[in-house]
Image (cartoon, rainbow, N blue to C red):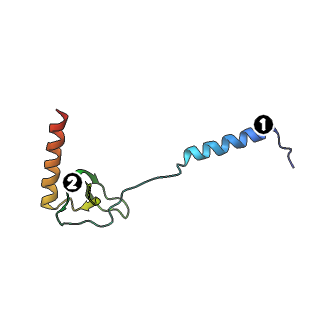
Amino acid sequence: CHPITPLYLSLQLVRVVSASVRHPSKVTTNCCKSISKSKVPYPILKFRVHSALGPCKRAVIFYTSDVGPICSDPNARWVKEKVRELKRKMNKEKT
């Protein structure tokens, strides 16, 4: 057996701390596993385009104050129109 020395304890502490820094304890991901073609009947606050990756589908995520995020079909006509409208609104607010 090796005697426990202050140097040994210091090295173990550094190893534990560095391991926790490299591995975050909480990771959040928004993933649309299904999408809707139906028009969102709630006020839309903002949107985000979501790429397809793994089980996630390509989608436009509309954020609403009433029910939270809704995954919508990016190819639906109303979605394209709503995204254009929201982009115009964002551009006007910047100026």
Residue lying at 17% horizontally and 51% vertically, measured from the top left? 83
- At label 2, the amino acid type is Ile
Q: Pick out the residue farthest to the top.
A: 95
Residue type for callout 1: Leu
Identify whether 15 is placed above or below 44. Answer: above
**Quadrant of the drawing holding the C terminus:** top left
Q: Horizontal and vertical percent for residue 52?
A: 31, 59
Q: Quadrant of residue 28?
A: bottom left
Q: Pointers 1 and 2 in contact (CB under 8 A)?
A: no
User: Going 37% across and 64% down the picture, which residue do you hit?
Assistant: 55
**Residue at the (86%, 44%) spot, across then down:** 3
Distance in Å between CA atoms under marks 1 and 2: 58 Å
The residue that mark 2 highlights is 44
Horizontally, is 51 left or right of 26 in the view?
left
Quickly name the residue at label 1.
7
1 or 2: tag closer to the N-terminus: 1
Mark 2 crowd level (few <14, some 14–19, many ≥20, 10 Å Cα): some
Other residues around mark 1 within 10 Å, as few (<14) / some (14–19) / many (≥20): few
The picture places residue 32, in percent across and down from the top left corner, at 32, 62
